Image (tube, helix red, strand yellow):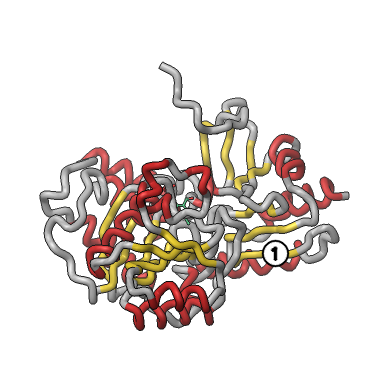
Amino acid sequence: MNLFDVYPLYDITPVKGKGIHVYDDKNVEYLDLYGGHAVISIGHSHPNYVQKIQEQVANLGFYSNAIQNPLQKELATKLGELSGCDDYNLFLVNSGAEANENALKVASFVTNKSRVIAFKHSFHGRTSAAVAATDNPKIHAPLNQQQSVTFVALEDEETIEAELKKGDVCAVIIEGIQGVGGLDVPTEHYLSYLSKKCKEHGALLILDEIQSGYGRTGKFFAYQYADINPDIITTAKGMGNGFPLGGVLIHSSIKAAYGMLGTTFGGNHLACAAGISVLDTLKDEKLMENVLQVSEYLVHELSFIPKVKSIKGKGLMLGITFDFPIKEIRAQLLHEHHIFTGASSNPNLLRILPPLCITKEQFDPFLLALKEILS
Ligand SMILES: Cc1ncc(COP(=O)(O)O)c(C=O)c1O
């Protein structure tokens, strides 16, 4: 059987990872400034992570959601403590799209409405409601067009208010920082405005922190730079450091009911073990503090590179923009300097999403390579 051919692939076969590096089948070392798409938070094959998963699978890898699973409670407690979101309840899932799908469903159940407001250049995943709230018609199947979604420009207040006033909106969904869309950050003022207007008009505010959360910006969630309490927060990627794990944090004012949501694999024992070791390591190794320090260093050093036009984003979710497409730079970084970086829908933007344990010095090979390529 062949694979369903949906991914254009690089001719590179990583077989091992350690910290911020991956190694291919010829033992070539790559500096990972992409984190497998913002997924690697505590570093590849972190010893605590490996040990925790090994121990758990040797005891019990999986049982269904019909039994007591103390690991889910431990994960929820530790997540509440480290994120400061103690006033939320946690529903565990397997991916980012599934987290958003369930968040949108909860909003629709609670408000008894169905229209969603999302933002231009948004990305929320590939499942039915999540993809419909994604501003990319190329990945909408005719089936997805049944959902009613209105796309509004980031920072636009007038249109949001006019749309919310119609009274049929169940949720406004917004990324903490736009990822695929090109690293636009909603201002603190705008998030406060959205929060206030959603409350006024009976819609729920969903913060998609799937990429921007779990310490990537130096705060646990990117929205925490603003003074708001979203109704629902979604998370995945860094949550499992590569183990498929996602979460929907639902404000305690929203009441659960048996059967309202469900999943076979979500919150399984092995995923919880992975998630707990991520939270323990984020805390013990003070990785959020590290993010702020190394990010400041990188942004400062980049400011001396003449062809760098601007730096977007926050913490270790950064986009470096140029006056020309970055395709060639990215290819040279990968093939000649063995450095992974990311791209976005903006062809002039190079994305930097490394593991959160990276040190200042570990950015130096990248800075040198970039200077050499640009000179
Ligand atoms: C902001 C955001 N939301 C949702 C998703 C979807 O996550 P997943 O691919 O795990 O379904 C992504 C993935 O890139 C994302 O960046």
* Residue 331 visible in the displayed image: yes
Residue 83, percent across and down? 38, 70
Q: Position of residue 277 (x, y in %)?
A: 36, 55
Q: Looking at the image, which residue sits at the far top? A: 1
Image spot of residue 80 (x, y percent): 32, 70
Task: Reply above or below: 371 against 330.
Answer: below
Whether the residue under disc 1 has CB within 8 Å of ligand 1: no
Work out whether 180 lies above or below 286: above
Q: Residue at x 47, y 72 (%)?
A: 223
Residue 57, compared with residue 261, is above or below; it is above
> Where does the N terminus fall, quadrant-wise?
top left
Q: Which of 365 and 177 is in front in this view?
A: 177
Q: Could you say whether the residue bearing mark 1 is in a helix, strand or loop? A: strand
The residue lying at 61 percent from left, 69 percent from top is 293
- Residue drawn 12% across the image and 59% down it: 258
In this view, the residue in front, 108 or 356, is 108
- The residue pinned by badge 1 equals 311
Determine whether, in the image, residue 340 is placed left or right of residue 302.
Answer: left
Q: Quadrant of residue 255?
A: bottom left
Amino acid carrying mark 1 in the image = Ile
Q: In this view, does 372 lie to the left or right of 147?
A: right
Q: Is residue 63 above or below residue 206?
A: above
